[in-house]
Image: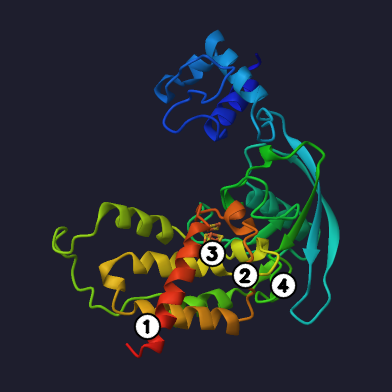
Amino acid sequence: MPEDQDFGEREHSARCRWHVAGGLRHALPPCHKRFRISQISRAALLHQDVRQHAGHCRASCPRTPIRPFATRNMNFKLKIWRQKNRQSRGKLVDYEVRDISPDTSFLEMLDILNENLLRAGGEPVAFDSDCREGICGTCSLTVNGEAHGPDHPGAVCELYMRKFRDGETITVEPFRVGAFPIVKDLVVDRIALDRIVQAGGFISARAGSAPEANSILVPKHDADLAMEAAACIGCGACAAACPNGSAMLSAAAKVSHLSFLPQGTPERERRVLKMVREMDEQGFGNCTNTYECEAVCPAKISASFIAKLNREYARAQFRQRLGE
Ligand code: SF4
Ligand code: FES
């Protein structure tokens, strides 16, 4: 097996959902091998048994087979959305980038394109980014029709060019949501999402200095769920992927995060009512359970938090009617 293919197998092993959590052991026949993740090293992957395991596993893998990592530099054709400003009409413009290392990130590839454009006296493509490590939620591109591109879960700043074929045509557009107007080229204005958080995604308890860890006890299960929900980076990909342009996943993450914690309890009802009202006012659509949001979310926020948001909303309305 060529060396670069070993890395492909390793990537497959890391991502394949039929590999049970915590180990590389395959959950289903026909594989009879039992390997623990600690055994997986580059050297171990060269071992015949492990290769056999990976072969069995990949043969029955329901996911698209993952290509081995490319090792040669590649060329790409790009179709990029160019739009002068909010009022003007935009269109897809063709570009080409050559000699791109497979280890170049998608945003670095756009940087290279912009350097080439500047050198040729053209106007660089405007796009958003900040941390470039999947934390800030600033990058907001639709790549080949998918919010954040084809490498889920992950933000587009975590996408690498080895995910594409040499010579592939890649279409790059901004997030397409009615509530996110285009500012320029690939930059959208996502203040509508911030306004939902401003409406209620906070606590007004005095935080003071860090309290002693055991002074406010939080059940482990609730703390874990609050942490999961708090992982939302506010990127807006959920709304971009949703056919209804709904921001329910993002709002649900914030509502759930705070409602699981004692510090969020005093404003629990007010918060959910205000945030849902703001979501409607900002022009986001409603959830119809298509689960597109969950599929593209770089923070792996579960759609089950939307059910939690609905329960919180029903509870708040009920208590409001009772005049509590
Ligand atoms: S829920 Fe996920 S996709 Fe939506 S804003 Fe948060 S991190 Fe982004
Ligand atoms: S640039 Fe920060 S998440 Fe992508």
**Which dot, 1 or 4, sits closer to the camera?**
1
Q: Work out whether 41 lies above or below 303.
A: above
The residue at label 4 has a CB less than 8 Å from ligand 2: no
**Which dot, 1 or 3, sits closer to the camera?**
1
For marks 2 and 4 on the same chain, the one whose residue lies earlier in the sequence: 4
Q: Quadrant of ligand 2?
A: bottom right
Report, in whole angstroms, how far the alpha carbon at label 1 lies from the one at label 3. Answer: 24 Å
Q: Please give the name of the residue rendered at 52% of the width and 24% of the height, measured from the top-left corner.
A: 26
Report, in whole angstroms, how far the alpha carbon at label 3 lies from the one at label 2. Answer: 8 Å
**Which dot, 2 or 1, sits closer to the camera?**
1
The residue at label 3 has a CB less than 8 Å from ligand 1: yes
Q: Nearer the viewer, residue 257 or 128?
A: 257
Q: Which residue is mark 2?
A: 246
Q: Residues within 10 Å of mark 1 (few under 14, many from 20)?
A: few
Judged left or right of residue 74, residue 315 is left
Q: Which residue is mark 3?
A: 249
Quadrant, the C terminus: bottom left
What is the number of the mark on residue 319? 1
Quadrant, the N terminus: top right
The percent coordinates of residue 270 (x first, y second) are 39, 83
